[in-house]
Structure formats: structure tokens, C-alpha cells
């Protein structure tokens, strides 16, 4: 919509067609851009082009599209066709994420610590996000997030002491076989295992975020979460169900995914 208005501003006689399936003008002022572009003569046609051919004589492009609003197949001859693509993360982001022990979403962008409470923080302490590295954003959202990242980082830079989460992974060396599975699944690179020396898994407490992935994957039950042992969890369940248990529902949710989704629901 913005690009079509810019073209109309510099070339008022240009004929512009926008082929779409759904338009969601969700941002501030975006609906106004949509209305203005239609008033300036931009044609919006609901339907995706199924075929593009080139005229061998004049080199123009012919587009066949099913106009779902008019319920007919239409053909347009155009000088230029522009394909609007979705924003994808750069290929180097995966290497950077592995280097900094940062998790990525299924579409390749970096994952924040919490979508509502810590939207610019990485799960790894001391790392903050700004711009389209976390998700596709426009200039306004990028500037806003950059300001939030600066504010969050200034807290660390101006602090003489740092507070760490008390929830950490604890290894029982009597049960640990140094198989190395915990080190492979840890998304923060907080576990070191010398498989040859068989000295057991060692947790770097400063890097551990307490996600519990290692404890869930350990088939020898050699890892527990500090302050969240099986005995403590069972005691919490008993306390929660002490009165009117038939009226209560207990859920075990991951702090980084299912809990956040449940909170949003």
C-alpha cells in the first residue's frame, strides 16, 4: 500500500494492480493507507495470478487471474510484475544463534525469553533483541524495540551485582554415566560432559536457565531441578488438592511455551 502511494506520487498516470487473497491493515494508520491508495486509483483485485506469460513482440507480461469477487477469469497486460515475499531471517542467523546459545523459532527467527514479560530478552542472560531478528517488523516497531533493549541492557551495565534465577539443574554423579545426551539437548550450552574421561556432566550455573530439558531427557534420572525435585512437586500437588480436589485442575506447563500460550488464552 505504501509503495503504491509512492509510485502514484511520482507517476500519477501509472496503472497499479494489487492481487491479493486477504488484506489485514492492522497497524496504526495502515487502514488509512489502504483507503488513500484506493482513492488514488490503485486497483485491488481479490485473486492470485495463476499464469504469467511474456509477449514475444513487445515483451510485456500477461497475467491470468481468477477474480473471486467478480467470479470470472481476467487477463491483464502489464509492463512490470513485482512479487511480494515474506521476510525471512538471514542465513547467518543460525550460526550466530549457535554461537550465543540462543533458541530459534520454527521459522528461523530468534526466540524471546517470554513474549509478554521479557519480549526483548534472550533466554541467555545479557543478550537482547531489536528489529527483525526476532520477527518481521516495520521501522516504528524496530525503533521501539531498540529503545526497550537499551533500557534493559542499561540495568545490567549500571548494576554492581547481578541476580540469577535460583532454578538450576543439579547432577547426581552417582547416577550419571557421562552419556552426553544432556549436553546435546541443552539449548543454552550450559552443560559440559567429558565422555572419554567419564567424569559426569557439569552444569555451568551462570548459563543455566532452568528450563528442565536436560532433566526430561536424562534416562538415568541423574538430573533434577533445584527446588523442584520429585518430592517437592508431589508435596505441592498434595497441598493444592488438600481442599475440594474435585473442583481443581492441575496443569504442568513449560514456562517458555505452553504457560505463555495458556496465559494468552
Image (cartoon, rainbow, N blue to C red):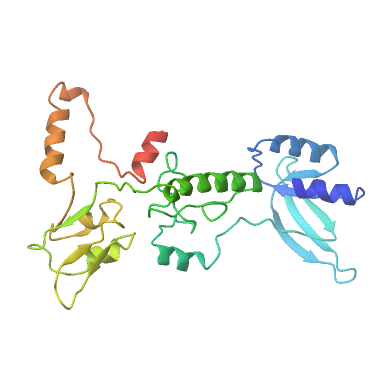
Residue at the (84%, 58%) spot, across then down: 78
- Between 201 and 147, the residue placed more toward the observer is 147
- Asked whether residue 73 is in view, the answer is no
> What x and y, as percent, mark residue 51?
72, 60
Q: Quadrant of the N terminus?
A: top right
Residue at the (16%, 69%) spot, across then down: 178
The answer to whether residue 116 is left or right of residue 52 is left
As drawn, 34 above or below 167? above
> What x and y, as percent, mark residue 13?
92, 49
> What x and y, as percent, mark residue 263?
38, 34
Q: Which of the 4 image quadrants contains residue 147?
A: top right
> What x and y, as percent, mark residue 231?
10, 42
- Between 82 and 121, the residue placed more toward the observer is 121
The answer to whether residue 13 is left or right of residue 4 is right
Q: Quadrant of the C terminus?
A: top left
Residue at the (64%, 40%) spot, across then down: 24
- Asked whether residue 151 is in view, the answer is yes
The answer to whether residue 51 is left or right of residue 184 is right
- Between 254 and 173, the residue placed more toward the observer is 173
Q: Which of the 4 image quadrants contains residue 86?
A: bottom right
Amino acid at each position: 500500500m505504501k509503495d503504491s502511494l509512492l509510485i502514484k506520487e511520482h507517476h500519477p498516470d501509472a496503472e497499479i494492480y494489487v492481487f491479493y487473497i486477504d488484506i489485514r491493515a492492522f497497524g496504526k494508520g495502515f487502514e488509512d493507507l489502504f483507503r488513500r491508495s484506493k482513492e488514488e486509483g490503485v486497483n485491488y483485485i481479490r485473486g492470485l495470478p495463476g499464469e504469467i506469460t511474456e509477449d514475444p513482440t513487445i515483451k510485456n507480461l500477461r497475467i491470468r487471474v481468477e477474480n473471486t469477487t467478480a467470479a470470472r477469469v481476467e487477463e491483464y497486460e502489464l509492463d512490470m510484475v513485482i512479487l511480494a515475499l515474506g521476510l525471512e531471517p538471514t542465513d547467518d542467523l543460525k550460526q550466530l544463534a549457535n554461537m550465543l546459545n540462543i533458541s530459534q523459532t520454527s521459522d528461523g527467527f530468534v526466540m524471546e525469553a517470554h513474549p509478554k514479560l521479557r519480549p526483548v530478552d534472550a533466554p541467555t542472560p545479557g543478550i537482547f533483541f531489536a528489529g527483525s531478528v526476532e520477527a518481521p517488523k516495520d521501522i516504528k516497531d524496530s525503533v521501539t524495540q531498540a529503545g526497550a533493549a537499551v533500557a534493559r541492557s542499561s540495568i545490567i551495565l549500571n548494576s554492581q551485582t547481578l541476580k540469577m534465577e535460583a532454578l538450576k539443574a543439579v547432577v547426581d554423579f552417582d547416577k550419571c554415566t557421562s552419556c552426553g545426551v544432556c549436553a546435546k539437548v541443552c539449548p543454552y550450552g550450559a552443560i559440559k560432559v567429558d565422555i572419554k574421561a567419564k567424569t559426569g556432566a557439569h552444569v555451568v550455573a551462570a548459563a543455566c536457565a532452568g528450563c528442565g530439558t536436560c532433566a526430561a531427557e536424562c534416562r538415568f534420572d541423574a538430573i533434577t531441578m533445584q527446588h523442584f525435585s520429585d518430592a517437592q512437586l508431589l508435596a505441592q500437588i498434595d497441598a493444592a488438592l488438600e481442599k475440594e480436589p474435585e473442583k481443581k485442575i492441575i496443569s504442568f506447563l513449560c514456562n517458555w511455551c505452553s504457560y505463555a500460550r495458556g496465559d494468552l488464552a
